[in-house]
Structures are given as structure tokens and as C-alpha cells.
Image (spheres, helix red, strand yellow):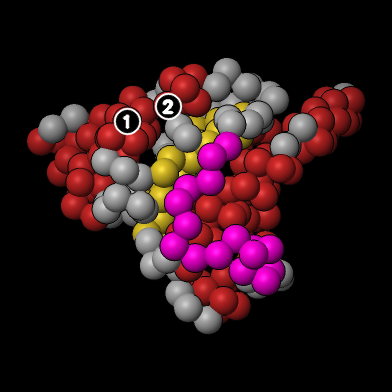
């Protein structure tokens, strides 16, 4: 009884993977490489399953990609410090749990990457708005509904599905491509001559 459901699920997952815009993934890995080359920081965050994916992404980038590249990535998941998150949520509001940490750490020229299926999580939206207003480059991986964060972020990849499981799996695949692009390909000749100390590349919102 379940096999047709499983097959349909896999077929839809494959469709979500096939719709990933690889040119946008390449653009984002170039932004991350520029962040690394220029000693900038990368901050990542999300909620629920997206928070788990962010933790996984930062682990792979901060450990394995850094091992390959020699110089370490300055990257941080804002999901991890439960004491700080609950202090911000309790004393201010849950909308402030990520922006409150960015206010301590972030500098102009740093990079923000957020994962959200709905694109409307208030704490994600508020953090992206703050980052935009303080000179950071913002990247969002969202689901098919796109949401407010897709309107705000400088760089967007929208997965062509609204199913939480399929979108989260496709977003994690993108995160793995970003990390393994460094782990398996290294600097790729300084990302094909992209150079250092460059300004953020101009690019449209993909997806």
C-alpha cells in the first residue's frame, strides 16, 4: 500500500533537485569564497529542521572545508547557544533571537545565510532586515511560497515545492554542494579569477 506513495515522494524529490538553479549555487559559493578570502564572517540561522540543517552546514564548512582550504572559515551558526537564545526570547521577543546575536558580532561586509521553508519566520525576517541595513550581504534558501525573506535577501534560491521535508532535503543538498565545492574542489583557482577584496557581485534573485 505504501510503495506508490514512496515512489511519488521520490519522484517529487527528484523534481525539486532538478529545479535547483546551479548558476545561483555557483554565485553563492563565490560569495562564500570571497567572504573567506577577505577574512569576513559568515552567520547562518533557521528554525526547526532548518536550524538542524544550518548546524550541519556550519559543521561541514567550519571543519571539513577549513581543513581543505588551510585558512579557516570564520563561520557561526546562531542556533546553538540555548542560554543566549532563551535570554533574548524571554527578555525581548522570539523575533530577536537571531538579530540580537548579529548585533554583537556582525560587521559590514560579513555574510548572512538563512534557511526557511515558509520564508516568513519573523525572527529570520527581522535578522535579514537588520543585516541589510548594516552592510551585510544576505542569502536566503526558501521554499516555493518564497515569503517575505525572499523579497528582502540579496541572493535567493527558492525550491520549487512547498512540502517541508522535500524543501529541507533540497536545501541541505545545496548546503552540501556549497561545502563540498571547497572540500573536493578547493579554491578552484581562486574561484576562476574572482580575486580578493572584491565588492559583492551584482546578481538577480534566482529561483
Residue 76, quarter of picture:
bottom left
Task: Tell me whether the residue at label 2 lies in contact with that at label 1, contact meaning CB atoms closer than 8 angstroms.
Answer: yes
Disc number for residue 152: 2
Q: Residue furthest left?
A: 91
Q: Nearer the viewer, residue 67 or 30?
A: 30
The x, y position of residue 207, in whole percent, is 65, 29
The x, y position of residue 19, in whole percent, is 77, 32
Who's the residue at 13% across and 32% down the image? 92
Range of residues picked out in magenta: 188-203
**Dot 1, crowdedness within 10 Å: few (<14), some or many (≥20)?**
some
Q: Nearer the viewer, residue 57 or 137?
A: 137
Q: Main secondary structure of the magenta part?
A: loop
Q: Is residue 180 visible?
A: no
Residue 26 in magenta? no
Residue 195 in magenta? yes
Task: Say which residue label 1 marks.
Answer: 129
Residue 152, quarter of picture:
top left
Who's the residue at 67% across and 50% down the image? 26
| First along the sequence among labels 2 and 1 | 1
Q: Nearer the viewer, residue 16 or 185?
A: 185
Who's the residue at 52% across and 56% down the image? 32
Q: Secondary structure at mark 1?
A: helix
Q: Quadrant of the N terminus?
A: top right
**Dot 2, crowdedness within 10 Å: few (<14), some or many (≥20)?**
some
Q: Is residue 193 visible?
A: yes
The x, y position of residue 23, in whole percent, is 71, 43
Who's the residue at 58% across and 48% down the image? 28
Q: Secondary structure at mark 2?
A: helix
Q: Answer left or right for 155 relative to 75.
A: right
Amino acid at each position: 500500500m505504501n510503495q506508490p506513495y514512496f515512489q511519488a515522494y521520490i519522484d517529487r524529490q527528484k523534481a525539486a533537485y532538478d529545479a535547483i538553479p546551479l548558476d545561483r549555487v555557483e554565485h553563492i559559493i563565490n560569495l562564500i569564497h570571497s567572504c573567506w578570502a577577505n577574512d569576513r564572517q559568515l552567520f547562518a540561522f533557521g528554525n526547526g529542521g532548518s536550524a538542524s540543517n544550518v548546524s550541519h552546514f556550519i559543521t561541514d564548512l567550519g571543519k571539513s572545508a577549513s581543513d581543505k582550504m588551510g585558512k579557516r572559515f570564520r563561520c557561526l551558526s546562531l542556533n546553538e547557544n540555548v542560554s543566549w537564545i532563551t535570554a533574548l526570547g524571554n527578555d525581548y521577543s522570539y523575533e530577536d533571537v537571531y538579530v540580537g546575536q548579529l548585533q554583537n558580532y556582525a560587521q559590514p561586509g560579513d555574510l548572512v545565510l538563512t534557511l526557511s521553508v515558509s520564508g516568513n519566520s519573523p525572527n529570520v525576517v527581522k535578522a535579514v532586515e537588520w543585516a541589510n541595513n548594516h552592510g551585510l550581504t544576505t542569502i536566503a534558501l526558501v521554499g516555493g511560497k518564497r515569503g517575505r525573506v525572499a523579497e528582502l535577501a540579496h541572493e535567493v534560491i527558492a525550491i520549487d515545492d512547498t512540502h517541508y521535508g522535500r524543501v529541507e532535503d533540497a536545501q541541505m543538498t545545496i548546503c552540501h554542494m556549497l561545502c563540498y565545492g571547497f572540500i573536493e574542489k578547493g579554491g578552484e583557482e581562486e574561484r576562476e579569477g574572482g580575486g580578493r577584496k572584491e565588492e559583492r557581485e551584482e546578481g538577480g534573485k534566482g529561483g
